[in-house]
Image (cartoon, grey):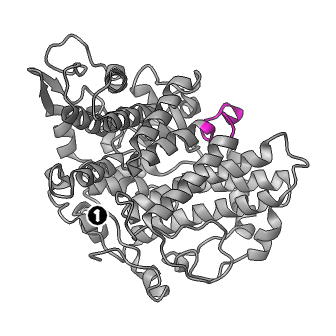
Amino acid sequence: MKTLYIKFYASILGIALVSLTSCEVANELDSFDPLYVLEAEEAINSPVSAELALTGAYSKMSSGFDGRPWLTTVPALMSFTAVPTAQTASNVEIAGFEANNPLKEGFNLKSMYTHLYEQINRANWIIEKVTELPDTGFEAGRRLGIVAEAKAIRAQANFELLRLWGQFYDLNSEYGVNIRLSPAKTSEVLPRGTVMEAYTAILNDLNDVIANAPDLRDGHKYYMNKTFGKSLKAKVLLFMGRYAEAATLASEVINSSDANFKLTPTFNELFDHSSIATLDNSESIFAVYSDPSEGTDNNLQWWLYNSISPNYINWAAAGTTTIAGQEISFDGNRVAGMQGFFGFNSKYNNLFLGESFDTVYFMRMAEVYLIFAEADARATNSVSTAALNALNDIRVRAGATTTGADGFETYPASITLPEFLEAVRVEKAMELATELGETWFDLIRYDYIDGFDAGFKVSDHKPTATNPDKFILPIPLQSVEVSNNVVLQNPSY
């Protein structure tokens, strides 16, 4: 695995797929004349080269040398789960993220934006060229499987783009993102699409993933699979407000998956960085590949640049809610346990402890349980036994007891719908904090569902987050300027 990544990234990708130089980093992939188009047209011409190209697309998802780590930490900074370290407290761009007033010309903003479009472009070359190939030489179903894996990579990147740069919460908004469904071959500049157009493209890709991706390729969770397609689709449907569909699909993942997809017995084993076997634990649905020679740099990201917010740690430790006279604690020790030796985030490896294997989950089963719990409750406007069990299953796995006393316990059947929805949001903040920014996007969704500033408020949890326009990031200024304003900037920027 490691050899394939290194060799392909250094050779095939270097001459075959569209790539960006440091001078081009601010440009949209569709706003400059791409390099190596002829070579890319010819490079993917056989089963072997198709597999190599797919490996190169995966390598982009784990790359620590560009914007990938910031795609996790920026939404954490914008919420209340992360703060700059002493080394970066004076960095104006990082301070802007934390203050919910992002700069339009930051290096990290540009690298994040460009990273996702390059990931999409690599996937687009694979989809286009492998679709044109005959089945000859491929194992049965493998040609379609390669295309489906590439579409999963593209769907994930487009969903990240939409959540960070588009008004993802408003299906009627014109402020979507530029959805590219074919590789960049010209310098043509295209305008942004609508939010609904972005969601439609993402769902179309995920339908193909569900139909044609492998169930579990070679037994490894660092390849895209059908279960990831179903899980991400359930999440997308939740974000779209299509709650009944989201609940049905999440329930299918929970109840119909085999032993390869189930909760791990304990929370801590999800973040055991001593062995590569952790990448294939039962709870992982998709996690990027990482080994001692090929890290993701997320460990250093959470030590050198950002750290877990003390306010978040204190909120988790002291937080309680009272339900039917019972005082129920938000958490046991999951959040406190994230504070690793020497300031590292224990969800990622710690070099000072000799840990070598990073864990970057793009989806795991605990999130599917919580997607089901919220979606089912919103769809039925009630708290079903199944939804309550899904929420409590995650708490029991984390050590909650069911005695009915005060403390870190399961939620009782007497919980009301508003109490339940808030409990789901809090549980996700305990369980998934610093994993792809889920805490931040939940704050935005809950605020929007109540009518911005009319009920639940992001600013109640992050006082500087008062302008809904700045709940999303600005399009990098140079991308707007290069496009001669064909690419529309987000409001208030």
From this viewpoint, which residue is outermost toward the front? 380
In the rendered structure, which amino acid carries the disc numbered 1? Answer: Phe
Looking at the picture, does residue 255 appear above or below residue 139? Answer: above
Q: Is disc 1 placed on a helix, strand or loop?
A: helix
212, 72: nearer the viewer: 212
Tell me if residue 221 is in the magenta stretch: yes
Q: Name the residue rendered at 30%, 64% in the picture.
A: 94
Residue at image mark 1? 97
Q: Position of residue 264 (x, y in %)?
A: 46, 23
Q: Position of residue 488 (x, y in %)?
A: 41, 79
Q: Name the residue rendered at 40%, 65% in the picture.
A: 165
* Highlighted range, magenta: 213-226
Looking at the picture, does residue 170 appear above or below residue 402? Answer: below
Q: Is residue 394 left or right of residue 48?
A: left
From this viewpoint, which residue is outermost toward the left? 325
User: Where is the N terminus found, in terms of image quarters?
Assistant: top right
23, 418: nearer the viewer: 418
Name which quarter of the figure residue 42 lies in.
bottom right
> Visible in this render: residue 358?
no
Q: Position of residue 469 (x, y in %)?
A: 27, 68
Characterize the magenta stretch by its predominant secondary structure: loop
Looking at the picture, does residue 52 appear above or below residue 225? Answer: below
User: Where is the C terminus found, in terms of image quarters?
Assistant: bottom left
Name which quarter of the figure residue 373 lies in.
top left
Looking at the picture, does residue 115 appear above or below residue 104? Answer: above
Tell me if residue 88 is in the magenta stretch: no
Q: Position of residue 281 (x, y in %)?
A: 54, 28
Disc 1 residue crowd, few under 14, some 14–19, many 20+, Cα 10 Å: many
Q: Name the residue rendered at 19%, 29% in the picture.
A: 416
